[in-house]
Amino acid sequence: MPTYTFCIAPEDAHKRLDVFLAKAIPLCPSRAFVQHLIKSGSVSINGIPRKNNYKLIAGETVDVSVQDKISFDVKPENIPLDVFYEDSVLIVINKPSGMTVHPGAGCGSGTLVNALLCHCKKLSNVNDDMTRPGIVHRLDKETSGLMVAVKSNRAHVDLAHQFEGRIVKKCYVALVEGCVEFDEGVIDAPLGPDPLHRQKRSVLAREPKEAQTFYRVLKRFSKASLVLLMPRTGRMHQLRVHMAHLGHPILGDEKYGKKNSFSRLALHAKALAFFHPQTKAWVEFSSPTPSEFLLG
């Protein structure tokens, strides 16, 4: 069990405890990871547990215990994977529509994580939720396309920081309802929890967070449009809510659009680009648009 002790310097005084530790703990993947440590009682200041928002005082001593995570709470399953790219530190998967990324309520098997644990000898284990080894970002169950997972903790932290800093570039294609009027544009509509539906997101949230999506029309059909979507932020359900807000919900989206409007959610993560966490080279991956999106 790694332990760390920090003496608060004058320049760190008045900082929030979680903000300070997110930068001070080696290989810390995120502030959420620190908040989990604080909540679990693994952090104390001068021997006294404190909350996430505690403001530090110069001269205080902060002790942290990070529990070693040896085993995962998920069983490996021999599920075929469409491996797009793989090396010693990461793997890029072309996830099919209908596959859940990791186990959760009502879904304990058949996920991408179950398949990755069987395929890879090792996955990162710095997530505070042990149902998510190797996972640094997610796609909705019905969304297909490119995802990157990581095998080492150092690579996990590097990529997590790239996602958090909006360095990673993500590009999606979607088939949406109706003919989109403008050839391209930016949807700038803050998002937050829907006040009436707990599992949905909305532009009508009480405390929304900024959210921007760039779109470009690739092709117009008689009753639908094929669009390229590039999110500048990474809010939950962002693309789905933004296109519905624009008046052109993604086909097959039963949550924000019309039921039975398509055979599946017509959203595909087409391209992914980032700095390789080991070589530091800029790498780009691009997958074909699903054939069912290319209406005649």
Image: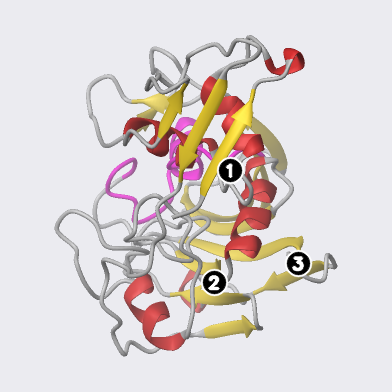
- Please state which of residues 136 and 264 is positioned toward the viewer in this rendering: 136
> Which is more toward the observer, 152 or 232?
152
- Residue 98, above or below 205: below
Disc 3 marks a residue whose amino acid type is His
Image disc number at residue 281: none
**Residue topped by disc 3:** 276
Q: Quadrant of the N terminus?
A: bottom left
Q: Which SS class for mark 3?
A: loop
Asked whether residue 237 is drawn in magenta, I would say yes
- The amino acid marked with disc number 1 is Val
**What segment carries the magenta color?**
232-257
Image coords of residue 279 (percent x, y): 82, 71
Alpha carbons under labels 1 and 2: distance apart = 16 Å
The mark total stands at 3
Q: Residues within 10 Å of mark 2 (few under 14, many from 20)?
A: few
Mostly what secondary structure, the magenta segment? loop
Q: Circle 3: is it few (<14), some (14-19), or many (20+) Cα within 10 Å?
A: some
Q: Position of residue 203 (x, y in %)?
A: 44, 23
Label whose residue precedes the other's in the sequence (1 or 2): 1
Give the distance between the C-alpha atoms of the residues marked 3 and 1, in whole angstroms.
36 Å
Please tell me in which quadrant of the rendered image residue 282 appears.
bottom right
The numbered mark at residue 294 is 2
User: Label 1, on which residue?
Assistant: 180
Q: Closer to the N terminus: mark 3 or mark 2?
A: 3
**What SS does tag 2 mark?**
loop
Query: Is residue 202 or residue 234 the one in the foreground?
Result: 234
Q: Residue at x 83, y 65 (%)?
A: 280
Q: Is residue 110 left or right of residue 262?
A: left
Q: Indicate whether 256 appears above or below 86.
A: above
